[in-house]
């Protein structure tokens, strides 16, 4: 009978941690050649393994019965990567093993014999390919046992699975044809919130769109799920399918006014009645609405969203909103709200936006997309220039064009307008997106869809979503590069007379957004130059050892641990005295401690960074876009490769470049 069964397994594989779950419904068998029984049922084959459907309640016992049959040479469980049914992995019975250099051969043989492993091939010095025998534990258990042995450098089971073709299927759904801003075919579309009504072809011009579906086709994806777009607005329906997605889409939601996680769209009117703001839900869905069978989706459906509620405009709340985006590692910010009358930003707010735009994304900067604003002519019946957030020199101010490739006359204008993006206006058609209503009972929220959204409020998150597609093609783009690509790839609409000698229109910016051209240029753009250790002006030298803060912000604690109170915060580039070294902490003053992983020791009296270098110790090592195996793989290092170490994290990751991280277990500092 089956005993001591392993249902989940976590072990090192290919330089990263692999999590496997045993399939509850399938096993795999390999038959002895010439002894496979005849059957009318067509079983799924993975090379010489046959997948067998099993009863979840008796899987282990059924597998034992199969193994006992004389015609079966191998019977094995099927394993799933991250518990996903679409990734069945079949252990072949073989393992790849590397002993630590210099391990005596008799010890190597003894370790293999203890697990009854049979050596099949010598791969290199101290490296072998082995297979299990009937007396061996299963290959997964063998690998886990071997990895616990300090004499083993690498022990990995071999797996067999079917390849995928990576075929990209364009989204579909009943409402997908209504999203003309993604692809405008010049034909009529249905209006989803007005029953049996249509907009005729006269309201559309073929190609008057943002070329988003073409960008998806070029990328062969709907974007990178590791990118985060912050949407700053008045409230959100976080249970809406477009914002909830598969349950992992929402990240770090924040109410900047009351410092809570309540970002709901509720508001209370002066008469005491309750209402619902639908604006934020619609904006977030235009940027990154999740793909599903409805066919309503954002420009970057795979991106995650950081929803930040800002329903009262005060300096403190505005600063907290933008700093929350920075501190939570967002890649892009979209903001479609502003002051009711043209006012300048305070110095504090203006400086904060500058800091966020320049310091985010490990110094690459965060592109901030701001709506130009609506209501031209203004209440005085005079045209109004963009103001407040949209007038800030560091942001990307977005104006509006319509489904006929015309300037939408309601949009504010001025020299700060950077580009325009498709939305409603004039004789054009509204945008199809998510919305939220007050329920019939007056106490609940009702998820919905509308084809009547628009304004620069819609154009702005569309541009932010397209930026996420650009970063999906090349995540190392700086803000300056993003702006240059957008400027170079827009379509000049409205006639050449509208643009000045620099190619800018006060109403259309440099032109109408073109996602395909922007993504193609981002993909072809040369990667950023290799990062060098931070060199900042430092304090006068003294006999005290000094260190420089290498991360954007660093909390100073009253004791050596995160359970102690925060007493202040340091910024990247700050130089501090290193008075006492404790396990993973530095004491920098009386009752002041900082995490040592975010401080780099200075030499030469505090005038230069002490360089840290490392060498790859495993055969290959994946380079990730962030400090986790859930982040995208962006490169591969081979054994012996040397790297510069810019930052270490408490959970075992090292940053070796802009958006380049490796697991420190496989790096030996040299």
Image: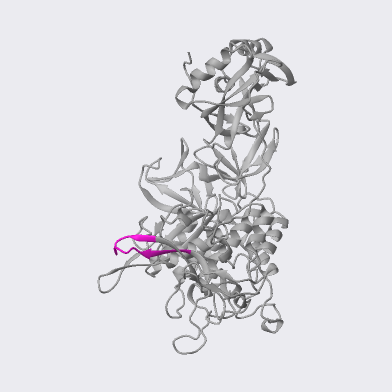
Is residue 439 part of the magenta span, yes or no?
A: yes
Foreground residue among 144 and 5: 5
Q: Residue furthest bottom?
A: 381
Instruction: Tell me where residue 531 appears, x and y as whole percent.
Output: 65, 50
Which residue range is magenta in the image? 434-446
Does residue 452 lie above or below 660 as drawn?
A: below
Quarter containing the C terminus: top right
Residue 417, percent across and down? 59, 76
- Say whether residue 238 is left or right of residue 70: left
Viewer can see residue 95: yes
- Relative side of 470 to 254, left or right: right
Identify which residue, 77 or 520, lies in the foreground.
Answer: 77
**Between 22 and 303, the one nearer to me in the picture:** 22
Q: Is residue 489 above or below residue 562?
A: below
Residue 513 horizontal/vertical position (percent): 63, 69
Q: Quadrant of residue 96?
A: top right
User: Is 445 colored magenta in this rendering?
Assistant: yes
State the residue at coordinates (49%, 61%): 285
Residue 539 visible (yes or no) = no
Q: Residue at x 68, y 38 (%)?
A: 637
Whether residue 545 is situated above or below residue 444 in the rendered picture: above
Colouring mode (rainbow / by chain / secondary structure / one colour): one colour
Residue 79 shown left or right of residue 346 in the figure: right
């Amino acid at each position: 009978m089956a005993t001591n069964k392993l249902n989940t397994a976590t072990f090192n594989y290919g330089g990263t941690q692999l999590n496997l779950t045993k399939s509850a419904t399938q096993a795999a068998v390999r038959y002895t050649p010439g002894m496979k029984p005849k059957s009318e049922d067509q079983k799924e084959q993975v090379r010489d393994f046959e997948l067998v459907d099993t009863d979840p309640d008796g899987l282990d016992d059924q597998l034992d019965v199969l193994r006992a049959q004389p015609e079966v040479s191998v019977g094995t469980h099927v394993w799933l990567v991250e518990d996903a049914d679409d990734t069945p992995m079949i252990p072949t019975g073989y393992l790849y093993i590397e002993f630590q250099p210099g391990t005596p051969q008799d010890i190597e043989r003894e370790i293999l014999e203890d697990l009854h492993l049979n050596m099949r091939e010598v791969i290199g010095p101290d490296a072998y390919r082995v297979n299990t025998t009937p007396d061996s534990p299963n290959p997964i258990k063998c690998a886990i046992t071997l990895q616990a042995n300090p004499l083993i450098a690498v022990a990995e089971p071999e797996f067999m699975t079917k390849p995928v073709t990576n075929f990209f299927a364009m989204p579909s759904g009943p409402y997908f044809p209504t999203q003309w801003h993604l692809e405008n075919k010049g034909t009529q579309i249905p209006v989803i919130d007005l029953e049996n009504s249509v907009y005729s072809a006269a309201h559309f011009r073929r190609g008057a769109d943002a070329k988003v579906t073409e960008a998806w086709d070029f990328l062969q994806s709907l974007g990178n799920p590791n990118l985060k777009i912050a949407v700053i607005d008045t409230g959100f329906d976080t249970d809406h399918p477009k914002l909830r997605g598969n349950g992992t889409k929402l990240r770090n939601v924040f109410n900047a006014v009351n410092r809570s996680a309540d970002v709901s769209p509720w508001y209370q009117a002066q008469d005491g009645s309750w209402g619902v703001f639908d604006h934020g839900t619609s904006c977030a869905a235009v940027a990154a609405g999740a793909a599903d069978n409805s066919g309503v989706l954002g420009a970057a459906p795979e991106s995650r969203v950081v929803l930040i509620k800002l329903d009262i405009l005060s300096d403190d709340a505005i600063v907290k909103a933008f700093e929350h985006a920075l501190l939570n590692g967002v890649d892009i910010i979209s903001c479609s709200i502003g002051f009711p009358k043209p006012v300048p930003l305070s110095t504090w707010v203006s400086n904060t936006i500058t800091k966020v735009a320049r310091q985010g994304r490990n110094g690459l900067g965060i592109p901030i997309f701001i709506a130009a604003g609506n209501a031209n002519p203004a209440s005085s019946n005079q045209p109004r220039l963009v103001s407040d957030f949209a007038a800030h020199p560091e942001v990307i101010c977005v104006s509006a064009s319509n489904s006929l490739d015309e300037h939408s006359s309601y949009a504010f204008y001025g020299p700060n307008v950077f580009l325009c993006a498709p939305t409603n206006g004039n004789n054009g058609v509204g945008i199809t997106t998510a919305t939220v209503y007050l329920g019939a009972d007056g106490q609940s929220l009702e998820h919905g869809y509308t084809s009547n959204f628009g304004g620069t409020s819609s154009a702005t998150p569309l541009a932010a979503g397209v930026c996420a597609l650009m970063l999906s093609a090349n995540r190392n783009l700086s803000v300056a590069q993003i702006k240059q690509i957008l400027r170079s790839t827009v379509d000049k609409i409205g006639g050449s007379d509208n643009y000045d000698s620099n190619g800018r229109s006060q109403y259309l910016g440099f032109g109408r957004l073109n996602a395909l051209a922007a993504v193609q240029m981002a993909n072809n753009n040369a990667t950023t130059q290799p990062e060098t250790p931070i060199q900042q002006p430092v304090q006068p030298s003294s006999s005290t050892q000094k260190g420089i803060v290498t991360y954007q912000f660093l909390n100073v604690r009253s004791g050596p641990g995160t359970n102690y109170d925060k007493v202040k915060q340091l910024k990247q580039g700050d130089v501090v005295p290193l008075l006492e070294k404790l396990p993973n902490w530095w004491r920098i003053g009386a009752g002041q401690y900082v995490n040592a992983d975010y401080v780099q020791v200075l030499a030469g009296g505090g005038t230069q960074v002490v360089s840290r270098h490392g060498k790859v110790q495993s055969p290959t090592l994946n380079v990730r876009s962030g400090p986790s195996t859930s982040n995208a793989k962006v490169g591969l290092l081979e054994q012996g490769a040397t790297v510069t170490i810019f930052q270490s994290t408490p959970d075992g990751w090292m940053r070796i470049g802009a958006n380049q991280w490796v697991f420190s277990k496989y790096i030996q500092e040299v």
